[in-house]
Image: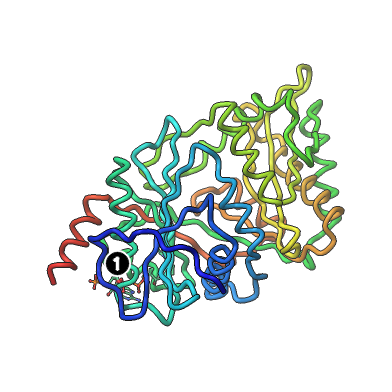
Amino acid sequence: MSQPTPLPVPTHSPRLPAGLRLEPYDARTAPDALVEALAAFATAQLHERQPDDPAIQPGQLAAQLRHLPPFVALPAWAVWDGGRVVAEANIALVNLDQNRHLAQVNLGVLAPYRRQGLGRTLLAQVTEAAHEAERRLLLLGSHARVPAGEAALRRAGATPGLSAQVNQLALADLSHEQLAQWAAQGQARAQGHRLDLWEGEVPGADLAAFAELTQVMNDQPLGDLDMEDSALSTEQFREAEAHFQASGRQRVLVVARRPNDGGLVGFTELTWHPARPTLLAQGATGVRPEARGLGLGRWLKAAALQRALARNPEARFVRTENADSNAAMRRINEEMGFRPYSTTTLWQLEVAQAQAYLAGAAAR
Ligand SMILES: CC(C)(COP(=O)(O)OP(=O)(O)OC[C@H]1O[C@@H](n2cnc3c(N)ncnc32)[C@H](O)[C@@H]1OP(=O)(O)O)[C@@H](O)C(=O)NCCC(=O)NCCS
């Protein structure tokens, strides 16, 4: 496989084990060979926690990286052993009006390369990028099935911010009668409300109202996360939508409209990638406070799943993630047949704490 042209490595970068190279890369211009190596790396990381999942396809990753919305900067680094990426980190600097103190970090090292300082080397890169961008808090994720993540994060001084359960519905166990019943009950209880199905782009006439509706997701429990409510402008929402459309993912978006004026009061989205059709992702579901308690949540989810299954008969599983404290959504999911699959935790690490940890490690 041909190698991408190496970019200059920061002179302060800590030493790596012999034979390994650290190189920054630009997600938006990543050449095919780099994307292929990153997809192989991402698949290895995924299979460590979810061995049965379909592999991440290079085309899928390329679309995601090359079409990032303009309000996201994504400094990134890979550690190479020959033509293979063995560790990778990136830091999402999201330039919205809110949460300018935060930066979301992904950082991973292949199992055979752990405990040799690669994680720390990459943490030094992301910490410096965060500092330069004047972000003071890093958010990092760990999975219960890979305990090394939590151990290294605790060692660096990170604290848990929010735990979430990944739930999975095996479609072989799904009760189609129950879905039909939820749809009928929803119609009866939420008198006068109606559902619309959007399968392509969000209709232009509804875009601004839909962007505003999605802010209902700010009502999700955030645990101890130091995070502000966020809101995309209509333009930013359009940019985020363009990123989604470029990703090649398929989507069923169902919205609920209230009686009389047809204003939007609820939505849910189910997505999948045609290269990994067995796995559906149940994304956000939100209902405005004044329309809660009418069975709209169940009705929306039932309608979206019915439609997704009609379009994608290869689907076998649906996955979703819910904060441990989100009782309402957990209840709906349990009734639908979702069962606990895994747990994720979002950790917070102050940039100042990361710098102190790295300085201490360097002095040892
Ligand atoms: C987390 C991860 C990136 C660490 O990579 P690594 O290359 O092994 O990390 P390092 O060798 O640089 O170790 C960093 C520190 O964590 C400690 N550490 C790492 N793994 C550990 C483990 N399993 N148990 C205890 N301590 C551990 C190291 O001892 C070191 O401490 P020190 O600075 O006091 O010497 C790696 O385990 C991984 O890829 N996990 C899966 C992805 C993940 O969970 N990422 C979480 C961050 S987004």
Residue 322 percent location from the top left of the image = 56, 52
Dot 1: element: helix
Residue extending farthest to the left is 363
Graded by Cα atoms within 10 Å as few (under 14), some (14 to 19) or many (20 or more), the crowding at tag 1 reads: many
The answer to whether residue 311 is left or right of residue 299 is right
Please give the residue where the numbered disc 1 appears in the rendered image: 120
Closest to the observer, 281 or 297: 281
Residue at position x 49%, y 50% in the image? 325
Closest to the observer, 22 or 130: 22
**Snapshot quadrant of residue 227:** top left
Residue at position x 39%, y 73% in the image? 148
Residue 157 percent location from the top left of the image = 26, 60
**Snapshot quadrant of residue 90:** bottom left
- Residue 42 vs 245, above or below: the answer is below
Quarter of the image with the N terminus in it: bottom right
Closest to the observer, 314 or 128: 128
**Cβ of mark 1 under 8 A from ligand 1:** yes
Residue 109 percent location from the top left of the image = 42, 71
Ligand 1 - quadrant of the structure image: bottom left
Q: Which three-letter amino acid code belongs to the residue tagged 1?
A: Arg
Residue 225 percent location from the top left of the image = 38, 46
Residue at position x 87%, y 53% in the image? 310
Residue at position x 52%, y 38% in the image? 70
